[in-house]
Image (spheres, rainbow, N blue to C red):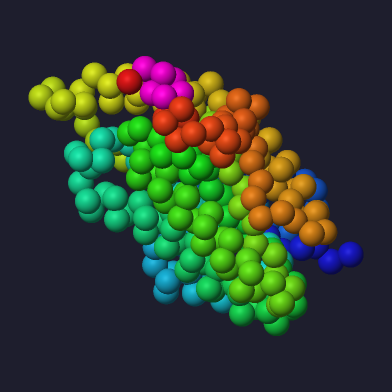
């Protein structure tokens, strides 16, 4: 059987790289993307294409190059994303716009680029990597939570719009996994004169510890394979520690103030 062609944005490291390596072992033809091939000249495992999800021209060129070579795109994993932390009041607005540009506009640009081919094939699957953080407004991660929530809602709408074309669209929301996301994340400095100095500093330390102690991202890769192989996939999937996944259920069933109090206690605010 002909190998399915999978395109993974942000494929040079972290969760994206784990997904690519695992799916390649499972017999898929993998292409990952990176903003700079030069910086990843020693990358091994699968082929990388240079692509910046914030630049539609870059996307169009990379997708055309891939189609010229393979003639099809069966699965798009919208994995490229950036983190951001800080008090909303003190977060520079240009940084907020940058994160929305990557985490929300980027997946939209990518979907627009691959959907014409998927329609022609009458087959395709787009998996948008969101986050368990997108199910709730987390203190000092509000902007990041908002981008992932927006992507999840957009997925719900787009899924219905393309249903008659044989294209499936789903989200996969990871919890905390051991990746290098903190290295590329924008975080507001802890200002000495800030009224948020102590609570933000403590929360930032907790966030970093959660990532450092997170599970192996191979678990996300295995979940991606399950989603791809599911004949009639659900809208939303989650992967992560049991308590992290359970928190999304609590958000649905508890009164708002009760759930808010749980978060305040968790972050010691």
Using the image as rendered, state which of residue 150 and residue 206 is in the foreground: 150
Classify 10 as above or below 254.
below
Q: Is residue 154 visible?
A: yes
Using the image as rendered, state which of residue 9 and residue 199 is in the foreground: 199
Q: Is residue 10 visible?
A: no
**Residue 114 screen position, x and y as percent:** 59, 72
**Residue 166 screen position, x and y as percent:** 74, 73
**Residue 103 screen position, x and y as percent:** 44, 54
**Residue 113 screen position, x and y as percent:** 54, 73
**Residue shown at 80%/54% (left/top)?**
230
The quarter of the rendered structure image containing the N terminus is bottom right
Q: Quadrant of residue 228?
A: bottom right
Q: Quadrant of residue 235?
A: bottom right
The quarter of the rendered structure image containing the C terminus is top left
Label the magenta part by its dominant secondary structure: helix
**Residue shown at 53%/21% (left/top)?**
213
Does 70 sit left or right of 210 as displayed? right
- The range drawn in magenta is 261-268
Furthest residue toward bottom = 120
């Amino acid at each position: 059987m002909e190998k399915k062609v999978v395109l993974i944005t942000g494929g040079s490291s972290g969760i994206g790289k784990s997904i690519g390596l695992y799916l390649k072992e499972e017999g898929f033809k993998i292409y990952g993307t990176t903003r700079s091939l030069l910086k990843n000249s020693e990358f091994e495992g699968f082929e990388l294409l240079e692509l910046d999800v914030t630049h539609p021209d870059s996307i169009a060129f990379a997708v055309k190059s891939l189609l010229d070579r393979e003639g099809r795109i069966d699965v798009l994993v919208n994995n490229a994303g950036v983190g951001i932390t800080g008090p909303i009041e003190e977060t520079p607005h240009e940084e907020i716009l940058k994160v929305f540009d990557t985490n929300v506009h980027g997946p939209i640009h990518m979907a627009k680029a691959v959907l014409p081919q998927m329609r022609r094939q009458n087959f395709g699957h787009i998996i948008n990597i969101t986050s368990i953080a997108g199910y709730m407004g987390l203190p000092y991660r509000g902007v990041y939570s908002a981008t992932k929530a927006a992507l999840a809602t957009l997925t719900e709408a787009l899924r219905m719009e393309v249903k008659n074309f044989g294209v499936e669209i789903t989200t996969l929301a990871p919890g905390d996994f051991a990746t290098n996301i903190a290295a590329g994340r924008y975080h507001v400095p802890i200002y000495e004169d800030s009224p948020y100095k102590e609570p933000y500093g403590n929360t930032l330390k907790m966030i970093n510890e959660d990532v450092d102690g997170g599970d192996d991202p191979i678990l996300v890769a295995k979940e991606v394979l399950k989603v791809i192989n599911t004949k009639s996939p659900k809208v939303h999937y989650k992967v992560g520690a049991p308590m992290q996944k359970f928190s999304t259920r609590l958000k649905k069933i508890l009164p708002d103030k009760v759930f808010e109090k749980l978060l305040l206690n968790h972050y010691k605010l």
